Amino acid sequence: MRLADAIDELAGSFVSVWEARHLAAPVPATQLRVLFAVERQGTINVTGVAAELDALLSSASRLCSRMETAGLLERTPGPNRRVIAYRLSSQGAAMLAELRSERRRDLAEVLLGMEADDRRTLLDGLRCFREAGGARPGASAEVPESA
């Protein structure tokens, strides 16, 4: 089995712990993606939301309006008056903070079942992965043949 195949198979358990909280979030996955995008960018306009979701502008606009009505997003002045920009509301920010907190508790619970040396090895490996480009959007998933 190639290294990439083994990692793909074993990463499933890590990803399942990571995603469990996302699946239990009080909003649909699409809205969660928007919240994370807004958090990452600070403010975002409808065009940015559409690009983030690979959706039509009209769909992104309706989604942002629904999220604003639900209290998750707030309108903010855009660079010009014709463009509507959104930022996280305090409720949206609190939801993401709670989600992260729960996810970290879940991860900590799993990590407690590991030996200290294994936890350090995992952390070192994840840091190396990030430095090698795993955190870059669109980074290639291809692994050299020797892997």
Image: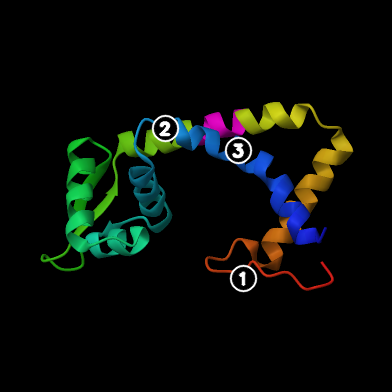
Residue at 43%, 55% in the rendered image? 40
Q: Where is residue 52 in the image (x, y as percent from the top left)?
A: 36, 60
Query: In this rendering, is residue 12 above or below 128?
Result: above
Q: Mark 1 points at which residue?
A: 140
Which amino acid lies under the numbered mark 2 shown in the image of this protein? Ala
Secondary structure beneath disc 2?
A: loop
CA distance separating discs 2 and 1: 29 Å
Per the rendered image, the range of residues in magenta is 100-105
Secondary structure beneath disc 3?
A: helix
Q: Where is residue 49 in the image (x, y as percent from the top left)?
A: 30, 58
Crowding around mark 2 (Cα neighbors within 10 Å: few <14, some 14 to 19, many 20+) is: some
Crowding around mark 1 (Cα neighbors within 10 Å: few <14, some 14 to 19, many 20+) is: few
Residue at 69%, 26% in the rendered image? 109
Q: In the drawing, does residue 22 fall left or right of residue 117?
A: left
Nearer to me, 9 or 58: 9
Q: Position of residue 79 (x, y in %)?
A: 20, 67
Q: Where the N terminus falls, by quadrant?
A: bottom right
Which numbered tag is attached to residue 24?
none
Which numbered tag is attached to residue 25?
2
Q: Where the C terminus falls, by quadrant?
A: bottom right
CA distance separating discs 3 and 2: 14 Å
Q: Which residue is most to the left? A: 82
Q: Name the residue under label 3.
A: 16
Label 3 close to label 2 by CB (< 8 Å) = no
